Structures are given as C-alpha cells and as structure tokens.
Image: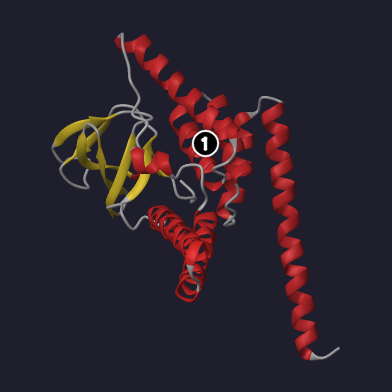
Amino acid sequence: MNRIGLILLLSAWAASASAQPLEQLFREGTSAAQSGDYSSAERAYLRILEAGVHDPDVEFNLGIAYGGQSQYGRALAHFERARRLDPGAEAPRLAADEARRLIAERRADQEGSAEVDAGGGFVDSLYSGFTESALAVTTAIATLLMFLFLIVRSRASGSLKIGSALIATVGCLVAFFAGAGTLEKRGVFRAGQDAIIVQDQVALRDGPDPRARERGIAREGDFATVINSDGEFVHVRTRNGEGWVPASGAVLLEASVD
C-alpha cells in the first residue's frame, strides 16, 4: 500500500472511531433521560456538543434534559437552537413555547404576574421557517431564472415578451426576498448575537465586574442580544435595558457549548 493510501485509510479509521463514541453517548443520553436521570443525560449531550456536533436532535434532547431538572431557561435556549437548526420541525417550536409557559408560571407563582420576552420580531418570524442553505439556493435559482427570462424577453415579441417580463419580475422579487433572508440568517443586519437569559434576577452591571454598579435586572427566559464580551462576562441588551452579566447567565442561540 502506498503512502497516500495509508493516510486515507488511517483518516477513515479515525473518523469512524470518533463517530462510534458519539453515537454511544447519544444512546446513553437518551437512555438516561428515559429513565429520569436527566443530569447524566445532560452530561452526555454536552459532551457531544463539545465534540463540535451541531445537530437539532442533540439540542432538543439536551433541552429535555434541562427541562427535567426544572432549568427552563436553559431548556428554552436549546429548544431555540434546535428550531434554528431545523426550522421546519414542529417539536422544538412547541417545546420552546412550553418552556416559556413554565417560566412564566413559576414567575407568576412568585410575583403574581409574569411575561416572558419571546424576542425576535417581524423579520425573525418572517424567515423562521427557512434554513440559511434553503434561502441561499432559492436566491441562486431565482436570480438565474430572472436573467434567463430577461434574455428571452429581449428576443421575444408579443405575449411571450410580456410573459417573460412577468416571470423575470417575479424572479427578481423572490431573489430579493431570499437574499435578504440569507443575510438575516447570517446576522448581517443584527448588531450582536442572539441569546437567551438562563438565570433569573441576573444583575445588569455597568462593567464586566461583579462589583460594578447594578443598572437593572435580566429575567430567565428573556431574549437578549450579546453585543460584546470580556473574560467571563458578556454585554447584553434586553427589554429591561443593557449591561454586563456573567457569561454563564446567557446562552447563545448559535450552536456552541454553554
């Protein structure tokens, strides 16, 4: 066997060897969750994420594990991650709604009334059912069709010319819509990274220091935008204002380990 063949063989073996433990971890996590051992399930799924896996099923199951431990803020964050990885799936959306309901219910029991910020907004909801790759492919196809029918229009006459112009116009509108969605998914229009506050009554401080002056409070389950980071603190913007909070108090909605 030549050297290149040996390298390829060793690479394939290494990939297979790494995949097997991850599959085993997933089975262990699922088995633990089914038996009610949610802390063990949490550890198994976190190890999968630490290996660099971005999978909606892992995120969803990790949300279930946190929910089983009444950590509804963290559960919500991972349900939202699963929803973003698989926008067409119904279960993550329903689970996220249920997590928000449970957070609000717990807060209402303590304070008499409660509301959990769902975040997002019109633009986010407009594209929530589409993946970035689907929008990018749609942009490419619509742009191609637009130019194709513009060429047809330039050489046609009568009703064919009018029809080609209409199709080219529709292609232009679809390309614009899908292209804007692709940029939105990539965060081009956002000033920071989307996150969920996962601890309740987190102090918003003037600086990245636990001794800094408190300027407000962030609530569990509220949507936040992370606009800066410094060591073990992140600077967030929430509906209750902005300030620095411990990094452990906010989970980014882009797939990463918290």
Single out the residue that lies furthest toward the front: 158
Query: Judging from the image, what secondary structure is the residue with disc 1 in?
Result: helix
Neighbourhood count class around disc 1 (C-alpha, 10 Å): few under 14, some 14–19, many 20 upward: many
Number of numbered labels in the structure image: 1
Residue 65's spot in the image, x, y percent? 58, 32
Please, is residue 1 above or below residue 165 in the view?
Answer: below
Picture quarter with the N terminus = bottom right
Q: Residue at x 62, y 50 (%)?
A: 48
Please, is residue 104 above or below residue 65 in the view?
Answer: above
Residue 110's spot in the image, x, y percent? 34, 11
Three-letter amino acid code at the position of disc 1: Phe
Please, is residue 53 above or below residue 93 in the view?
Answer: below
Residue 145's spot in the image, x, y percent? 52, 66
Q: Residue at x 52, y 64 (%)?
A: 160
**78 to the left or right of 209:** right
Single out the residue that lies furthest toward the bottom: 2
**156 to the left or right of 5:** left
Please, is residue 197 above or below residue 234 in the view?
Answer: above
Residue 139's spot in the image, x, y percent? 48, 61
**176 to the left or right of 140:** left
Residue that mark 1 sits on: 79
Q: Examine the image and state in which quarter residue 95 appears.
A: top right
Q: Residue at x 74, y 47 (%)?
A: 24
